[in-house]
Amino acid sequence: MEGLRECEANMVVYLHPSKAKSPTDAILRELSSLLFTYSETFDGVVLAYDPNVRSNLARILPGVHPYFEVKIKARLLLFNPEPDMLLEGEVVKITRNSIHAVVLGFSAAVIGVEDIREEFKHKTKRGEEVFVSLSYRKHKIKVGTILRFVVKSFDEEVLHISGSLTADKTGCAQWLDKNLDKWSQTESTSKKRKVTEGNEKPEGDVLRMNQKFIREDETPDEGTSMVNKPASLNKDQQIKRSKKRRKDHS
């Protein structure tokens, strides 16, 4: 899943002298306070850590309430979803106007009805609300489904994600993985349709092309369609036909 990354950080932990007998436990408690909160220093939500005390020496800081400083090196697992990233979460609630999911067990994600593509229609089956694909009936989104969606925005303060299901590569993750060829082909077809529509010439240009005729003093090249030949005949042909009519009448 996108949005996850690891980093190594050089950190300093300040401990009270009363913790001198068990500094390791005190360090772990300090690091635990960072879990599942957004850190501007690390630019992400801290999900896990693996600390390594760099030295058994600590520097005592002078003051009214002296603390001692411990330097550690820690590996951190961070979560920072950005727009257009693909995420997965478990669906916990479905209504006619929204789909609610939980990502990594702590972050809430909501997809509004305006961000659900028209392929999915809301239905109620046996008292259970679901979204069913009109193209593939087995492609369903219900409570318990692992949902794959695109990130629209991420609120760092409340860890809330706004998502979208407008892309063809989104929906029930299990169905998408089993039917990779189907949805990738659908996505490719939609892209080709957009390119074709973008390359289509305006109707006025087509009419102007059809109105191109051969001039009277020009001879059509071999292979030129006679449909484009003007309705009026050239002067030589008119003279020949008039002479022929005179002979016939005489």
Image (spheres, rainbow, N blue to C red):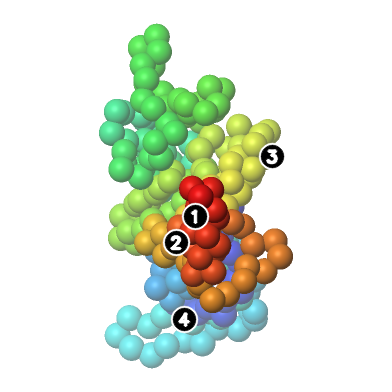
Dot 2 crowding, Cα within 10 Å, few <14, some 14–19, many 20+: few
Separation of marks 2 and 1 at Cα, in angstroms: 21 Å
- The dot on residue 226 is none
Mark 2 or mark 3, whichever is nearer to me: 2
SS for dot 2? loop
Separation of marks 1 and 3 at Cα, in angstroms: 75 Å
Relative to residue 31, is residue 170 depicted above or below? above
Question: Is residue 18 visible in the rendered structure shown here?
Answer: no
Tell me where residue 153 appears, x and y as whole percent.
36, 58
Q: State the residue position of label 2.
A: 232
SS for dot 4? strand
Q: Which residue is drawn at 63% across and 68% down?
A: 220
Separation of marks 1 and 4 at Cα, in angstroms: 125 Å
Callout 4, which amino acid? Phe
Relative to residue 86, is residue 57 depicted above or below? below
Q: State the residue position of label 3.
A: 181
Direction bottom: furthest residue = 62
Callout 2, which amino acid? Ser
Callout 3, which amino acid? Asp
Q: Decide if residue 164 is on the left or right side of residue 179.
A: left
Labels 1 and 4: the sequence-earlier one: 4
Labels 2 and 1: the sequence-earlier one: 2
Mark 2 or mark 1, whichever is nearer to me: 1
Q: State the residue position of label 1.
A: 246
The answer to whether the residues at label 2 and label 1 have Cβ atoms under 8 Å apart is no
SS for dot 3? helix
